[in-house]
Every structure is written in C-alpha cells, then in structure tokens.
Image: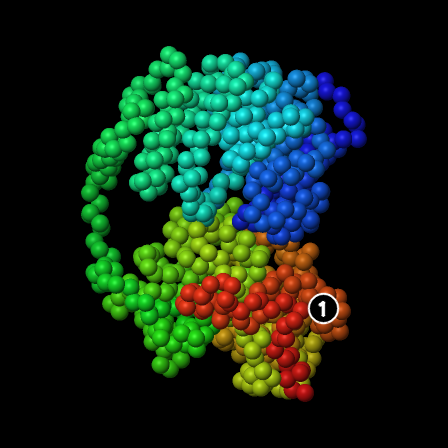
C-alpha cells in the first residue's frame, strides 16, 4: 500500500468550470454532503457567478476569469490540490450518494504501481435522473479487483472517455501534465490509460453526468468536428511512442471509425463540412488501419468500405436508400395517417407563404387575457421608441370588452388571427404561444416570463409529480426551441431559465419591463391608485397575495382574515388578492368589506398598482415578492406550510434562510409582527436589502427601453442604457411619503 503524508488528503475533488445552467450549486451540494476525513474540495470556478456559488459552499476556491477553458480550469485546480489522487468533476455533473466514499476507498487500497482508477457512471438528462449501473459496467466487471495494463484489458478504452469517471494519481498527473491537460476531454481520458503503468477499476457508480439539451448549447463549429479526428490520430501517435500493444491500438481504431460514421450519419452539418469531415476520417482510417484488420459484416461493413474509399457521395446515396426503406416501413405501420392530417388552418398555411411584415408585432400575456405584465410594458415603450412597428394583441373573446379603447387585437382561431401570426416579424409573450404556431426563420420570438422563480419550473418539474401532472414536456421543448430571446430580472433567473428551459436562445439580462413603474411612479400616481381603491389617507394598506398550491384540489384559506383585521384595527386595510372570500352576505367578512377594512382586489389589474398602493406585502411563495422588493417596502413571508410546499413543488433556494423580511409560521406570529413595529424594523430592512441586491439586480426603471432597443431596433448590447446599481436607485415614494 502507498505510504503518504498523514496531513495530506488522500483524494482531491476538483470541481471545475463555469456555472452552466445553474447546475454548479447541485454539484457542490452533492460533494460537500459527502466530505469526510481524507477528502478535500477545490472549486476551479470560472466567472463571477461560479465564484459566488463556490464561496457559499466552502472548500478551496480557485477564481478564474470568464472564458477560461475546461482544460485550463482543471490544471489550475490540480495546481492547488494537496491530495495523493485527483478527481476532476465538471461543474454540471455531480457524484451520487456514496460516490465519494466509494472512490476514496478504492484509491486507498490500490498498490503503488496503479496510476489510474476507472469507475462507473450514470447519466441524467433534462428529462430524467440517472440511476442503477452505467453502460460501462461490463468493461469494469471484466477487470474486477485486479490491477492491469492496457495491453491486458484493451476493453477499458471503450469505457466512456470522461475524466470524471476516473481518478488520477497526483504524481502521475504532474509527470504527464502536458498530455493530460489537453482541451478536449476524450483525449486526456484515454491518454491516461495509455500512459498508466497499471490501471484499477471499481464497479461503483461515482459520477452522475448531466447531459445538457443540445438545443441549449452553442452550435458545434467545423473546427470542433475536425478536432475529433485529430484527437484520435494524436492518440494513435501516443500509442506508437509508448509501444502500446496491438490489441489496444485495434480497439482504438474501431472506436475512431465507429464514432466518425456516427457523426456523419446523425449530426447536422453543412454539406461542405460533412464532406471534409468524411475526407479527414477516411485519411485517418487508411493511415492507421492495423495489420490484418478485417471489416465487420453487414451494413456496417459497407459503411466502413465507403469510408476507407473516401466515397462520400456514394455513402450519402447508401444512407438515403436506407432512410427510404425505413420511411416506407413506418408509413405502412402508421397506415397512412392522412398525409399531413388536413391542413390545420387553410388561411394560416397560405399566410405562411407570404413575406414576413417587418413592422408587425404580436403581443400576448397570460394565455390571451389582455394587455398586461412585461408584454404590456414593452408594447407601451415600443409606441414611444419605435412607433413604426404596429402592435396587435391576441386576446380571448371574453377579454375583448376589457381592452383599452382603440387596441388593435385578434381573437384566436379567427382568419385574421392566423394571418397575423403568420406574418408578424415579432411575437412577444409572457407564457408560450400555442404549439401550432410556426417559427418562421425571419421572425423573432421574445419570451418575457412573468416572475422570478422560487418554485421549480419547466423541465425541473420532472422530479415533482404533483407539480408536473398533465404537462407534456415534449411539447414544452418544441415551444421553447422557438424562443430567440428570454428576458431576465436577475442572474438567478438567468441561470434557472437556462436549466429549466434548455435551448439556444439569448438571455436578455435587462430587467422586467413591468417593474419599470416602481421607479417611474410619482406621489400623485400613488394617491390616485389609493383613491380608486377607497383607501383613506393615513391608513396603512397591507397587500395579501398568496400563491397556488399544486397539492390542493381546492383552495384552503390560510388566514382568518376576520381575526387578523380585528386585531390590526381600523387604521389598517387588507388588500386581498386571490379567490379568498368565502360565503356571501352572511360571511363574517361582509361587514369588514362594507367598512373598507378588507378590499377584494382579486380581479384588479394591473397588480403593479396594488403594489404601489400598499405600505407592506404579505405573501407566501408568490413571485410578487421579487417585484415588490423593488419598492424597498416591508415584506412578510407567511410560510405556514413551507416544508410541504418545498417537498411537493420543489424550490430553487431555501426561502426560510434568505427571506425578504420577517417570516411568520403561524397567524399569531404574523399578527404580532404587524401589530407592533417589527414589520418595518431594522432586521426587516437588513433582510430586504440583501434580497434586493440579489433579486432586483437588473430592475432599475429602464428595462423596457433596453428590450425595445435591443430586440425591435437591433441596437448592440454596448449601446443600451447601463443598469443602475441597486444602491443608486430611487424607488417610487411610499404611500406615507406621497401624502406628506
């Protein structure tokens, strides 16, 4: 067994990279939850967001600038590591429960001659969590508890080439760092096996690899395609230099040919790139063909022969013939499903053949419920900055009478609706347009969202059956693939949207346009809103706005509003938003409503006016808290069922640990906070200040302008109004200030 410095850790876990789609936190949670004597954590954090997450989780943080490659991050982490063994874990991946212990145990028992320990892994996708044993189990089982050379176990080259599913002895890494620090992970993962004196294995799953949705990643460039062939050729040269036996070289050759054909067959590439890739793969196949090599039989053998002959055109013809055969079989099985199944709408199909109108913009909000939210604020700013663009709102038939006079609009399903949807150059929504809406190449889809996420959203709901019941995730993915831009109010939202809605859109870190009013409203505006609501001057108005519970079939009152109002007295008015009144004239609330001490604002729009009128907010887990925080007014979290809500719906952070103000778990606690001075004390202000810095990051009153200039006027990012720092902003006056 190896003798080491007892003060040094046995295993250094090096988490490296940027915070891809907000996954770094989950990775570090998984590692820190398994730390034990003999294990150290280092995070080679690329960019400020990753560094902030890493600092909160502890361990050694190696800060690296944006743009640092994964290879450079790995090397930087290894340079600070003190352990006898190095384990590189990408920031998007994570060790499953028991993974750290299993790897620590294995590296602690192998002989000194072993340089690499190879482990199993599983894969999680945007749809599912990894479980069970991975696809490499059979190769690892063939080695068992022995330690071997690559010549004795060439099948180890077929283990998925990741650095995260193998640990490297630190001295071995330093001796071969030039080879092992290569940029593309496939090369160093396999080069480690070539360079190792001896290799050991463990059949334990030590890594859960998070596969990101391809549509959420930058397109693969031609040079990246070509580098794959170059990496295989570099490995063959490395094997030559190290006199690797024939069997591993033959395995590597088969892997190269198989992967090259897979890329040509399955990956989308421009024809000229595919042709050049095929040509390079052909040259490599001829150059490195092992002596006595025999092609496989069947269709694969035909493909290999065409590759070796550099017969790209013949290969494509062969591929097309196979596709036609498969398509014919599928058509027979489907039984001719009405060849196109009747055109969904004749007018729409005809309109899709006409040019896009560069001056036509479609807006919708909350499933066609009218002019509201971020789309409404963007449309208003559009009229000011780009009046040549004509807005048309999509609204339901029931909403038509409620529209502002003169609003140009269409009703879903009508002839003009399909014509407008087909020809608009801009389509803006705070939810998604219907599945039937086609994304035209020269049309821009702008997704504004309608809140900062506390609860799990999108694909992140997959692990929460109560919240995801009835959701069609395939249809969701198709809808988000139409997005060109996604508006965000803060870095937290940006990361969560990338995770929950993985696709290749551009995030606009510009703030929520609907929140601009919180910086533009005047004292006169606030007095006018309170007058409309019937709130007398000098009265304290408290807005109560709870959210929906997925686990409740019907609404369950969470507060006894009668008791609360009686306890707070005549100087306090409760503005209650939601379906929270029960009973009719016999209700105990009836008298309070008549007296003006409880006002039902469930159907009042816009909600931003309610926030401006309120001296304080009571909410539970509603996203209104993030918007209201812009006003820098007191927020009380009434969280009587936090544990149930978090377990059934899932949340992105612990609201109890980072609330925007005081937290009440019972009505008595809530009453005490509001009845005394605690609702606006120093502790409340301190919590709110921290909350505002994190969640009001981009909301400074100029969000709509930035969005309109960037999307509708095409101005570059650097020409937009810069975001005003939180501490330099002046929110709208409080109701108290507005009356003084």
Q: Residue at x 22, y 49 (%)?
A: 340
Q: Residue at x 33, y 59 (%)?
A: 442
Q: Residue at x 63, y 56 (%)?
A: 642
Q: Is residue 182 above or below residue 709?
A: above
Crowdedness near tag 1: few (<14), some (14–19) or many (≥20) residues, C-alpha within 10 Å: some
Q: Residue at x 37, y 15 (%)?
A: 293
Secondary structure, mark 1, is: helix
* Residue 12 occupies quadrant: top right
Q: Of residues 16 and 286, which is closer to you in this image?
A: 286
Q: Is residue 435 left or right of residue 675?
A: left
Labels in figure, total: 1
* Residue 412 occupies quadrant: bottom left
* Residue 316 occupies quadrant: top left
- Residue denoted by label 1: 685
Q: Is residue 422 above or below residue 534?
A: above
Q: Quadrant of the C terminus?
A: bottom right
Q: Can residue 569 be seen from the camera position used here? A: yes
Q: Of residues 730 and 526, which is closer to you in this image?
A: 730
Q: Can residue 157 be seen from the camera position used here? A: no
User: Residue 578's x, y, as percent?
Assistant: 53, 69
Q: As drawn, which residue projects farthest toward the top?
A: 292
């Amino acid at each position: 067994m190896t003798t080491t410095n007892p003060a040094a850790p046995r295993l250094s876990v090096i988490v490296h990279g940027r915070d891809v789609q907000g996954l770094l936190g989950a990775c570090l949670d998984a590692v820190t939850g398994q730390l034990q004597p003999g294990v150290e954590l280092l995070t080679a954090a690329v960019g400020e967001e990753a560094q902030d997450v890493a600092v909160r989780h502890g361990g050694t943080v190696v800060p690296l600038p944006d743009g640092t490659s994964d290879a450079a991050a790995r090397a930087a982490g290894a340079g600070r590591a003190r352990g006898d063994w190095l384990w590189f874990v990408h920031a998007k991946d994570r060790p499953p429960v028991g993974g750290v212990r299993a790897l620590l145990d294995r590296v602690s028992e192998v002989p000194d001659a072993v340089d690499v320990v190879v482990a199993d892994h599983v894969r999680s996708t945007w749809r599912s969590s990894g479980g069970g044993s991975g696809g490499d189990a059979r190769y690892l089982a063939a080695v068992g508890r022995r330690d071997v050379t690559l010549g004795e176990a060439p099948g180890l080259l077929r283990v998925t080439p990741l650095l995260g599913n193998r640990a490297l002895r630190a001295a071995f890494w330093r001796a071969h760092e030039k080879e092992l620090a290569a940029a593309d992970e496939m090369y160093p993962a396999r080069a480690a096996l070539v360079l190792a004196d001896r290799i050991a294995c463990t059949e334990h799953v030590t890594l859960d690899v998070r596969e990101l949705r391809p549509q959420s990643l930058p397109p693969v460039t031609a040079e990246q395609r070509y580098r794959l062939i170059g990496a295989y050729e570099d490995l063959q040269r490395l094997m030559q230099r190290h006199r690797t036996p024939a069997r591993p070289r033959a395995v590597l050759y088969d892997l190269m040919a198989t992967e090259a054909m897979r890329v040509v067959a399955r990956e989308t590439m421009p024809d000229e790139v595919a042709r050049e890739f095929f040509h390079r793969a052909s040259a490599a196949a001829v150059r490195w063909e092992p002596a006595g090599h025999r092609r496989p039989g069947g269709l694969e053998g035909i493909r290999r022969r065409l590759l070796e002959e550099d017969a790209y055109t013949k290969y494509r013809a062969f591929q097309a013939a196979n596709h036609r055969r498969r398509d014919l079989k599928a058509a027979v099985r489907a039984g001719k499903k009405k060849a196109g199944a009747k055109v969904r709408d004749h007018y729409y199909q005809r309109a899709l053949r006409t040019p896009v109108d560069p001056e036509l913009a479609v807006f919708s909000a909350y499933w066609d419920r009218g002019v509201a939210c971020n789309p409404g604020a963007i449309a208003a700013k559009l009229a000011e900055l780009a009046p040549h663009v004509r807005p048309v709102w999509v609204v339901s038939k029931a909403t038509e009478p409620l529209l502002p006079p003169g609003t140009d609009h269409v009703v879903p399903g009508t002839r003009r609706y399909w014509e407008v949807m087909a020809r608009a150059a801009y389509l803006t929504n705070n939810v998604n347009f219907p599945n039937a809406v086609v994304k035209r190449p020269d049309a821009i889809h702008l997704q504004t969202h309608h809140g900062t996420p506390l609860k799990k959203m999108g694909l992140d709901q997959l692990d929460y059956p109560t919240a995801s019941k009835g959701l069609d995730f395939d249809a969701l993915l198709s809808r988000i693939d139409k997005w060109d831009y996604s508006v965000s109010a803060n870095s937290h939202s940006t990361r969560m949207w990338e995770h929950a809605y993985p696709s290749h859109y551009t995030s606009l870190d510009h703030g929520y346009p609907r929140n601009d009013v919180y910086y533009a409203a005047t004292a006169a505006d606030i007095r006018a809103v309170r007058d409309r609501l019937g709130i007398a001057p000098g009265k304290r108005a408290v807005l109560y706005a709870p959210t929906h519970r997925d686990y409740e079939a019907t609404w369950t009152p969470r507060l006894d509003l009668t008791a609360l109002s009686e306890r707070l007295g005549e100087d306090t008015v409760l503005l209650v938003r939601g379906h929270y009144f029960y009973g009719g004239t016999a209700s105990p609330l009836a008298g309070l409503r008549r007296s003006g001490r409880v006002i039902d604002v469930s159907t009042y729009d816009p909600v931003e006016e309610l926030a401006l009128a309120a001296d304080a907010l009571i909410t539970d887990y509603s996203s209104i808290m993030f918007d209201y925080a812009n006003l820098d007014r007191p927020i009380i979290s009434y969280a009587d069922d936090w544990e149930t809500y978090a377990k059934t719906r899932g949340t992105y952070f612990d609201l109890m640990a980072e609330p925007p103000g005081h937290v009440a778990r019972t009505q008595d606690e809530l009453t005490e906070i509001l009845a005394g001075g605690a609702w606006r004390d120093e502790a409340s202000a301190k919590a709110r200040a921290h909350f505002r810095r994190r969640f009001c990051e981009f909301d400074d009153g100029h969000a709509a302008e930035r969005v309109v200039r960037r999307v509708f006027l095409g101005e570059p990012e650097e020409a937009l109004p810069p975001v005003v720092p939180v501490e330099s902003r002046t929110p709208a006056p409080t109701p108290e200030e507005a009356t003084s």
